[in-house]
Amino acid sequence: MKKSHFTSDADVEPPSQESEPPGRMRRLAKLSLAKQPISPPRCTQPFLLPQPEQSSPLAAHPVRSLISFKISSRSRSFYKCFYPHITSAEWNDWHWQLCNRITDMPGLSRFIMISENESKALTHHAGQLPVSITPYYASLIDGIDVTHPVRRTVVPAYDEFIPSPGESSDPLAEDRDSPAPGIVHRYPDRALFLVTGFCFTHCRYCTRSRIVGNETKDCYMQEHWEQALAYIEAHPAIRDVLLSGGDPLTLEDESLEWLLSRLRRIPHVEFIRIGTKAPMVLPQRITSSLTRLLKRFHPLWLSIHVTHPEELTPEASQACGRLADAGIPLGSQTVLLAGVNDSIATMKELVHGLLSIRVKPYYLYQCDPIHGSAHFRTPVEKGLEIIQGLRGHTTGYAVPTFVVDAPGGGGKIPLVPDYVVGREGEDLLLKNYAGITYRYPDPGGTVGLK
Ligand code: SF4
């Protein structure tokens, strides 16, 4: 079921938090900065459909404070069918989306015909990554086709329970390289700061499935943030901090503001990055108030986790446009997944779509060997074949770097197709994108010698 990209009708998002009087959201954020777990808003009743007689609190806000946000015709049809009692403002409210995440079989079975394989996985899920899908992201799923790429990435399959050699719950040995809560310090001048274990939507191939969705994990208390910040402060070599998780954009604006302000007060932190999938799974999170907040902390870059061209909806386009307009450089990170995006045609469509929404394709990752990931992993040659099918065949900016994150904590290792044919006398023989051999005068060189 293919979607037309960038065709939409405009709609509204709820009022920006900055124009809002102090209320629930501010109270939640303040609570989260006290001695409480720092976390996104919790919902005691996930997947609760508003009843017809309930009035929407958002409807009470004056129209003048509403800011245009797109709803694609596909999403509109979806919510009118499955959530007939909500308003477009509620659909565009990221808190509403968060509170109505689909987390179990009864929830999923409202939208999709669950296959036997999926049903077995859903009833056998103890100890595994829980299911979590925002209603917006559910609107991208094909309810009938079990091979649908977006569906495969978020609906569990029984294959997750089949172990294979070399798999691990922490294949990148991040826990081993963690000198303070939430900190992974592997490269001298960079630190990874896992600020939350919470995500909007859970990817079935998640490298951090050991922590994602595990709300009992205690490393996201403010005192642990303080310990992590103290570690960064005490290590002047760290000039670059990557906020990740979980998804940092699940935090309330006020929590993010507090964290970014603290990082910006550390003189040696020159550069802040945030890794997020929000623009793809909950583009409504990219509110005007969020972009106003983020632009105060430049230089700040965003790495967006993107998987498939079907994610590049009008909503995602608008979210990325807002971030780009705020001067935030955007790069993509894509995991190569068997049967999802492992073809040159799919990847070309994805990278072209990304460039058109001002996102530079940055990394293409070989899928990490987490437990039960064999059905997602491709041979490494597949990634090289895709890079070879892009390099020279399309815009250079569209070509990501293909990397293997070395199991055991070796870090990212870039792999490139081999364009060196050999040497003849003083000439280096090179093959171009079309497979034609050329000579380059390279007296005394050793490249290409066997
Ligand atoms: S968005 Fe990232 S951290 Fe969250 S579930 Fe997906 S892969 Fe894991």
Image: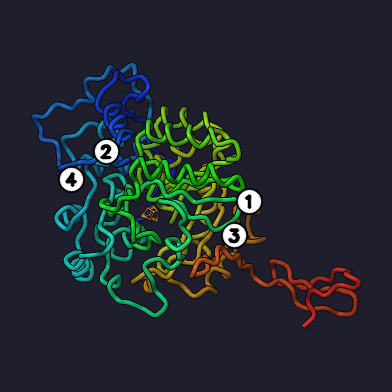
Left or right of 392? Residue 186 is left
* Residue 282, horizontal then vertical, whole percent: 35, 43
Q: Residue at x 54, y 44 (%)?
A: 234
Q: Quadrant of the N terminus?
A: bottom left
Disc nearer the start of the sequence (4/2) = 2
Question: Which amino acid lies under the numbered mark 3 shown in the image of this protein?
Answer: Thr
Amino acid type shown at disc 1: Tyr
Q: 174 or 15, which lies in front?
A: 174
Q: Secondary structure at mark 4?
A: loop
Residue 397 sits above or below residue 320 on the image: below
Spatial CA distance of label 3 from label 4 is 39 Å
Q: Amino acid at mark 4?
A: Phe
Name the residue located 79 percent from the left edge and 74 percent from the top edge. 447
Quarter for ligand 1? bottom left
Q: CA distance from mark 2 to mark 1?
A: 38 Å
Q: Report the residue that reaches farthest toward the bottom.
A: 450
- Look at discs 1 and 4 and give the one toward the viewer: 4
Residue 47: give its label.
Answer: 4
Disc 2 or 1, which lies upstream in sequence? 2
Marker count (numbered): 4
Q: Residues within 10 Å of mark 1 (few under 14, many from 20)?
A: some
Q: Is residue 404 left or right of residue 18?
A: right
What's the CA distance linking mark 1 and mark 4? 41 Å
